[in-house]
Amino acid sequence: RALFLAERRISPMLLVADDAGRRHPRPDGQIVIGRLGAAQRRAIDWLMADGVRGEDIDAAFVTRGFGRGPLGAGGSPGAPVKPEVWSRIAGALLAEGARLIEEGKVRRAGDIDALAVRGMGWPRRLGGPMISAQIAGLAGQLRRLRDWQNDDPLWMPSTPLVKATKTADGFPT
C-alpha cells in the first residue's frame, strides 16, 4: 500500500507513466537511482573487504526476493544468510536515502522507495528500502548506523533519519 501511494505522489520529474501506464524513471530519478546504487555497491565492497563471500551477499538478496544477487556469485533462497550482510546493505540505502531527502533531491521517503522498485529491481512486496527500514524499526537501524559510521562514512546518519526516528510515524509521507 505504501508503494502504491508513493508512486502516485512522486514528482513527474522523477518518475513518469508511459501511455501503457508503466512507470519509468526520468533523468532526475536516474540520478537518485545512481546514488542508491553507488551506496549499495560501496556497502558490498566493504563487506567483501571484511571477508564476506560473494555467495553470501548474493544469498542475502535472493532470500529477500530479488531475482538474483548483484555479484552473480550464486546464492539461493534457502541458503543461510548472515544477518549483518543484509543489515549493512539496507543500512547504506537507508542512510543514502535520508541524505537525498536532506539535499532536496526527493521530497519524501516514498520517492526513494518508488525509484528503488522501478529503477533498481527492488521487490515490490518489500515496498522499498525506506519503508522496509521503518517497518523493521528506525531506532534499531539508527543504532546500527551509529555503530558502523566509524567503519565508513557511508553509514553516517543524517538529520532526516534522526528526526524520523524520534517520531512515532517515522518519515513524512
Image (cartoon, helix red, strand yellow):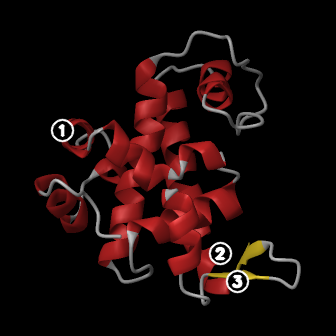
Percent from the top left, x then y, of residue 76? 73, 18
In this figure, which residue is indicated by the disc labeled 2? 30
Q: Residues within 10 Å of mark 1 (few under 14, many from 20)?
A: few
Q: Residue at x 60, y 90 (%)?
A: 13
Considering the numbered disc 3 on the image, is that residue within a helix, a strand or a loop?
strand
Q: Residue at x 46, y 66 (%)?
A: 110
State the image quarter where residue 28 is shown.
bottom right
Image location (x, y in percent) of residue 120 = 67, 56
Circles 3 and 2: CB atoms closer than 8 Å: no
- The amino acid at mark 1 is Arg
- Say whether disc 2 or disc 1 marks the residue closer to the N-terminus: 2
Instruction: Work out which quarter of the rendered image holds the C terminus and state it.
Output: bottom left
Looking at the image, residue 68 sits to the left or right of residue 120; the answer is: right
Query: Which of 61 and 12 lies nearest the eye of the viewer?
Result: 12
Q: Quadrant of residue 115?
A: bottom right
What secondary structure is marked by label 1? helix
Where is residue 137 drawn, in percent x and y? 27, 40
Say left or right for 108 vs 164. right
| Relative to 45, 165 lies left or right | left
Q: Amino acid at mark 3?
A: Val
**Mark 2 residue type:** Gln
Position above or below: 170 against 7:
above
Relative horizontal placement of residue 6, taking residue 84 as reference (left or right): right
Compare residues 38 and 10 and report the one nearer the observer.
Answer: 10
Kindly give the residue lying farthest to the front in the view shown. 1
Residue hosting label 3? 16
Distance Cα–Cα, label 3 vs label 2: 12 Å
Residue at point 88%, 78% (across, down): 20
Q: Residue 21 appears at what percent x and percent y?
A: 81, 76
